[in-house]
Image (spheres, rainbow, N blue to C red):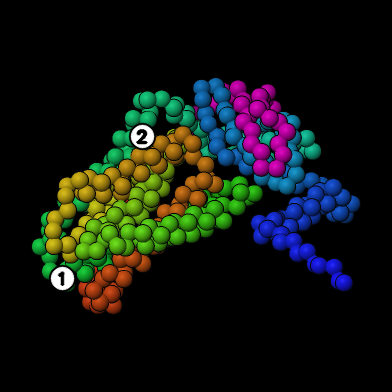
Amino acid sequence: MAADHVSVKVPNWLLSLVPVALVGLLVVVIFAFNPIENLRDVPAVERVAFERTTFEPGRIELHLRNDGPDPVQIAQVLINDAYWRFEASDADLGRLETATITVAYPWEPGLPVKISLVTSTGVVIIHEIEAAALTPEFDVETLGIYAVLGIYIGVVPVSIGLLWFSSLRRASKKWLSFFLAFTVGLLAFLLVDTTGEGLELAGEAAAALDGLALFAIGALIAVICLMRLENALEARKAGREGLFLAYLIAAGIGLHNLGEGLAVGAALAAGEIALGTFLVLGFALHNTTEGLAIVAPLGREGERPALSHFALLGAIAGVPAITGAWAGGFIFNAAWAALAFGIAAGAIAQVIWTISRSIRGGLVTAAGTGGFVAGLGFMYLTSLLTA
């Protein structure tokens, strides 16, 4: 008599762990035997990224990251071709590790500073600052100054632009289509501007962190999140599509204004006071039309939204400029800034798509084409003030 077969059912979750375990075993084998080690007869690749340089009275502080595949040991520090004593939080940096190096050096405001790091293998890594300037201290007064700048470039001009709502309520359908297309042109310019800034920051980030990938990841995350939000609110926005669009536009503009705040804060932290002041004036004029862009969809609404909506729209679009100014002044880093600009670019692109679908006749009508071109042209002309 044949023996009965006993079947054992293996849980699906256990089966799914088999490939993971095999991959882990492969990693262990590669690290244990290191098959390419004997093939390597070239010097180690040593790279260090200067993520932030701060100047305090009689002292320079360098924030470093190992940007190469091999460990780096900082042996000596030269400033303006002279050796100086230094203190390091960690002089031996493994891959992607960070360290802070402090040098007591009598730097002078406005003069260039050339910093050279010499590794234990003799590799020299150079970092140059065109003009040394005192880094703002993290205190209540400085926080207040940066907050006021954020209000000037974000909250105030956007709020002024919201006052166009009354005129838009009385506008004809043709003019409403024009201003919606104007909004698309404005946002299209912001998309190009944000993408350019983000790619530039990606190039300045540590190569090991892959700033370009961070920018792309941020953009894709923003698009998916806004699409998810739009789907989630689909049932609730019935009859109030204009208000829904206004909030989407405010969110996209707010993320862009975060980047503008970063630019101003970083400029002031680097001692570029004249540039910072010019940026503030330029951005203030530049951003006034952003309020118009936010309320443009509301012109189609049959009712007037409550004042609380206008306050919230202004805050969503303008307040991020304050956060950006703080971040740019005190904790600016090219890698995470590239990620932030990527999020802004993705959000703006998704908002452009959403608004374009809502324009009667699209952008190919006379009002649509005229509004789009006018939006691009106006933003270009005002952007010359911040160039």
Residue 237 visible to the viewer: yes
Left or right of 306 on screen, residue 20:
right
Residue 173 image label: 1
Look at 28% across and 41% down and name the residue there: 152
Q: Quadrant of residue 301?
A: bottom left
Q: Which residues are magenta?
A: 82-111
Left or right of 123 on screen, residue 191:
left
Q: How many marks?
A: 2
Identified by mark 1, the residue type is Lys
- Name of the residue lying farthest toward the right: 38
Look at 32% across and 42% down and name the residue there: 319
Identified by mark 2, the residue type is Tyr
Give neighbour class at mark 1: few <14, some 14-19, many 20+ (Cα, 10 Å): some
Of residue 92 and residue 279, the one placed in the foreground of this image is 92
Look at 71% across and 31% down and name the residue there: 91
Residue 365: give x, y in percent of width and height: 25, 77
Q: Is residue 294 above or below residue 136?
A: below
Q: Is residue 89 magenta?
A: yes
Residue 46: give x, y in percent of width and height: 73, 44
- Name of the residue lying farthest toward the front: 1
Residue 146 image label: 2
Closest to the camera, between mark 1 and mark 2, is: 1
Residue 236: give x, y in percent of width and height: 27, 59
Q: Quadrant of residue 323?
A: top left
Residue 141: give x, y in percent of width and height: 36, 25
Q: Is residue 332 above or below residue 60?
A: below
Q: Is residue 270 above or below residue 88?
A: below
Q: Is residue 183 magenta?
A: no
Say which element carries label 2: helix
Q: Is residue 264 above or below residue 89?
A: below
